[in-house]
Image (cartoon, coloured by chain):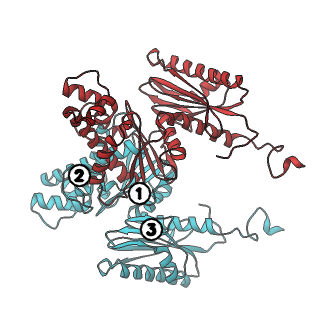
Chain colours: A red, B cyan
Amino acid sequence: MPEDPDDHGCVIALDVGGTGMKGALLDRGLDPLVTLRRPTPRTAGPGAVVDEIAATLAVLAGRAAARGLTVHRAGVVVPGVVAEDLRTAVHSANLGWRDLPLAALLEARTRLPVTLGHDVRAGGAAECLLGAARGARNVLFVAIGTGIAAAVVCDGRPVRADGHAGELGHVVVEPGGARCACGGRGCLETVASASAVATAFAARSGREGTDAADVAALVARSDRDALAVWDRAADALATALATATTLLAPELIVLGGGLAEAGDLLLGPVRARLADRLTFQRRPGLVRAELGDRAGCLGAGLAAWHDVDSTTAPDPRTTGTGARDR
Amino acid sequence: MPEDPDDHGCVIALDVGGTGMKGALLDRGLDPLVTLRRPTPRTAGPGAVVDEIAATLAVLAGRAAARGLTVHRAGVVVPGVVAEDLRTAVHSANLGWRDLPLAALLEARTRLPVTLGHDVRAGGAAECLLGAARGARNVLFVAIGTGIAAAVVCDGRPVRADGHAGELGHVVVEPGGARCACGGRGCLETVASASAVATAFAARSGREGTDAADVAALVARSDRDALAVWDRAADALATALATATTLLAPELIVLGGGLAEAGDLLLGPVRARLADRLTFQRRPGLVRAELGDRAGCLGAGLAAWHDVDSTTAPDPRTTGTGARDR
């Protein structure tokens, strides 16, 4: 991204998750000038969450003002179904809203122009520009946390389908399997999300209070219960990724989110089983995400800068070859 | 498409299938001025097929000349994996070629500019412009014949992934099921293609020489063997379409190809079972294709006209408001 030496401006970037928000002031090179984390008051209801988003944007705007930085725009990304073009948060089971014109609401509260995005698609866009998928034109970015969702990039463009595309976590991998929060049975999320791994381990071993990272550590020590649970999760991931590869033909699959922190402990078995399942399909690389939990926030900043560039009318005083010399 | 009254030109459109070719001269409104069908000499090898495509283009060019029509371009669509941008037929198991620069080969033989396309994506584009999916921006067009393939349109644009996307026929619907020609097991094609339906019926009933249309007719008469085979095919289709809906979120699924000729006999049960499998997903409509076996040829013409329009430099004598008056 070319940097304008005269531009001391920034954008506000905010990644709103089910438990916490990650905010930042990002310069044109997406370098963070200020960062901030705050809890998401999810249990207080969607109204309280919107209030807290607006308050967090105001705090970040204040930090910018204190440093003499101009805020050009705010980029806010949220989970669930998001229709970027309509600037609407269509649905989030986690945050409890439905058909919320969130960009307009936040603009009215903060007097800042706001770009609304989807957390996983934003994270995928950041990985494509700055992270593990630099240079790839066909990418599947999979975020494995409490839930599982994917961002699809095909022929160099995001595949959105009005915000409904990429629900990899609800591809059925065990027909007739465990009940999913979505109402279905045997969805990938019921087997391979970080929470499913933790729950399955507790149920199998009787050892409570163990999270997915603990299970991964036990896998590394060849704990039998942990290995069985991990094996089933890797198998389910490979099944869903094989199906996604058949339909979407990514060159590169990027695994992010909490469970991918396990690195090769997860990628190794998933890679082997995915290879077993593919026949004629173009074989995708499978790598770990590089940007970690900053991906969503960087993607929010990226979307905000994109809109700054596409909505700013050229200034005749400063644009064009040698315009200032005349 | 606006019609230029001065334009007496046409394009050649050719849909090359595993058994036959469908050719036409199409005017700017995609109305056929001449049509022609010839067998594909598949068993004679890929060289013979290319020779026959070139010969068929020459015949159609001759017909155009005889009518005083200018041929602006030829559009040729073929099955398998096709990279439109690279003008290359990447792979067809049926026609036996691999990495064939087919557009360039045909241009050298015919002295006509050639646009290369994929039969099912071309058919899907035709259904989107002229057929069952007019006005829809998120569409899955599924061609069910000897094999099963899909064209994906998302956010109003084709999803190609360099020609590898949309292999719905190889989504696994019966894990560990019957061996597929692709080398996998339990692919949708092994259960729900027209040939799979015919084979399964023969195996179950002992009645040989029955094709998929005959099986459909027996279903309408409540033949027990036919019902069992049909039921399994509808179930498999619903499973694969539910997965595609979860990942791609089409508003509309259009079923084409031979098996879709059965109409509501097929669409009814597939629609009901698809509805059963979806929970939070956006629910797609499910309709039958409108253009029948002309879809591929019309799509070939559409692609050719598209390239005529995008590669023709504007003529200052005939373009612009009132240019001729000056």
- In the displayed structure, would residue B84 be above or below residue A9? below
Please indicate, yes or no, whether residue B226 appears anywhere in the rendered image: yes
Numbered disc 2: secondary structure? helix
- In the displayed structure, would residue A9 be above or below residue B220? above
Dot 2 amino acid type: Ala
At 42% across and 51% down in the image, what residue appears? A252
Which is more toward the observer, A114 or B267? A114
Answer yes or no: are tags 2 and 3 on the same subunit.
yes
Q: CA distance from mark 2 to mark 1?
A: 22 Å
Q: CA distance from mark 1 to mark 3?
A: 14 Å
Q: Chain of mark 3?
A: B
How far across and down, in percent of the image, does residue B320 sit? Answer: 75, 63
Q: Which residue is mark 2?
A: B233
Answer yes or no: are tags 2 and 1 on the same subunit.
yes
Dot 1 amino acid type: Glu
Dot 3 amino acid type: Cys
Of the two numbered discs 2 and 1 on the same chain, state the one appearing first in sequence: 2
Q: Chain of mark 1?
A: B
Q: Circle 1: is it few (<14), some (14-19), or many (20+) Cα within 10 Å?
A: some
Numbered disc 3: secondary structure? helix
Which is more toward the observer, B229 or A258? A258
Of the two numbered discs 2 and 3 on the same chain, state the one appearing first in sequence: 2
Between tags 2 and 1, which lies in front? 2
Tag 1 and tag 3, C-beta contact below 8 Å: no
Q: Which residue is mark 1?
A: B290
Of the two numbered discs 1 and 3 on the same chain, state the one appearing first in sequence: 1
- In the displayed structure, would residue A65 be above or below residue B171? above
Q: Which residue is mark 3?
A: B297
Which is more toward the observer, B285 or B277? B277
Q: Circle 3: is it few (<14), some (14-19), or many (20+) Cα within 10 Å?
A: many
Q: Chain of mark 2?
A: B
At 45% across and 56% down in the image, what residue appears? B161
